[in-house]
Image: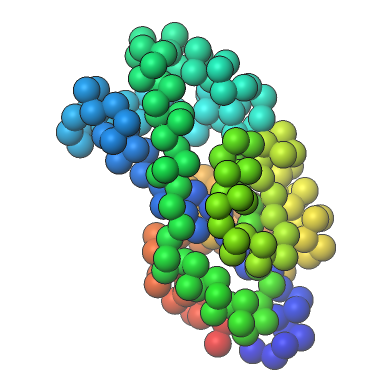
């Protein structure tokens, strides 16, 4: 791909589930094994706790509730003890580990001149933790964390804000996310997008769509 073509395009990465590992059932099994003691119970409590990233957790992603308020909301709604909810909330940074394969893909893309950005639903405590913990984040040309702008995916406004910040039109952006509703929302606004399942699949998708050589 010509350098000029790379300069006129941006590849946009989600964070949790793409650049970083993210498995709510695994998190719950680790933090509250007295409740999430097998696959079925872990899936049940993940649905109750995260509400498919709507409700209480979406408000947290948006930066609209504090950690204490979130814990209180979830405890009241699920009848889980406050201490159990606290363990899960505190355990999220331990679950968010760099995905080595995706980090390697980022390095390859950066080395060949591709412009890299991120767009992540991420509460402020976790985004600041990741920025402190992982130097490679500074290699992104720019990015948007949901809580910093009080908007969340899949709302159109956060995609519009991101495109404006990146200085590129929607058709000049390729977005990958592990949550299908976010991909659908991006495509509806004219972005190129696909659902991420692995770094290998993402690299193959980028190549098949003509975004990388």
Q: Position of residue 80 (x, y in %)?
A: 35, 14
Decide if residue 180 is in sight here. no
Residue 112 shown left or right of residue 167 in the figure: left
What residue do we see at 49% from left, 67% from top? 103
Q: Quadrant of residue 82?
A: top left
What residue do we see at 75% from left, 78% from top? 7
Q: Position of residue 27 (x, y in %)?
A: 34, 38
What residue do we see at 45% from left, 37% from top? 92
In this view of the protein, which residue sits in the foreground, 207 or 32? 32
Decide if residue 65 is in sight here. yes
What residue do we see at 17% from left, 33% from top? 38
Residue at the outermost bottom position: 2
Q: Position of residue 125 (x, y in %)?
A: 60, 35
Residue 40 shown left or right of residue 155 in the figure: left
Counting every numbered tag in the picture gives: 0
Work out which quarter of the rendered image holds the C terminus and state it.
bottom right
In this view of the protein, which residue sits in the foreground, 132 or 12? 132
In this view of the protein, which residue sits in the foreground, 208 or 91? 91
Q: Quadrant of residue 69?
A: top right
Residue 8 shown left or right of residue 111 in the figure: right
């Amino acid at each position: 791909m010509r350098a000029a073509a790379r300069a006129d395009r941006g590849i946009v990465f989600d964070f949790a589930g793409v650049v970083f590992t993210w498995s709510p059932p695994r998190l719950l099994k680790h933090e509250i094994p007295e409740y999430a003691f097998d696959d079925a119970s872990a899936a049940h409590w993940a649905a109750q706790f995260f509400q498919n990233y709507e409700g209480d957790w979406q408000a947290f992603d948006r930066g609209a509730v504090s950690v204490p308020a979130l814990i209180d909301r979830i405890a009241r709604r699920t009848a889980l003890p406050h201490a159990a909810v606290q363990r899960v909330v505190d355990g999220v940074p331990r679950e968010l580990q760099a995905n080595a394969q995706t980090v390697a893909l980022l390095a390859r893309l950066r080395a060949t001149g591709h412009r890299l950005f991120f767009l992540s639903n991420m509460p402020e405590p976790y985004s600041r933790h990741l920025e402190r913990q992982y130097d490679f984040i500074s290699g992104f040309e720019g990015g948007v964390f949901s809580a910093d702008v009080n908007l969340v995916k899949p709302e159109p406004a956060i995609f519009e804000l991101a495109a404006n910040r990146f200085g590129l039109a929607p058709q000049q952006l390729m977005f990958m996310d592990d949550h299908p509703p976010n991909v659908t929302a991006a495509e509806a606004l004219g972005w190129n997008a696909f659902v991420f399942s692995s770094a290998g699949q993402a690299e193959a998708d980028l190549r098949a769509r003509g975004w990388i050589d």
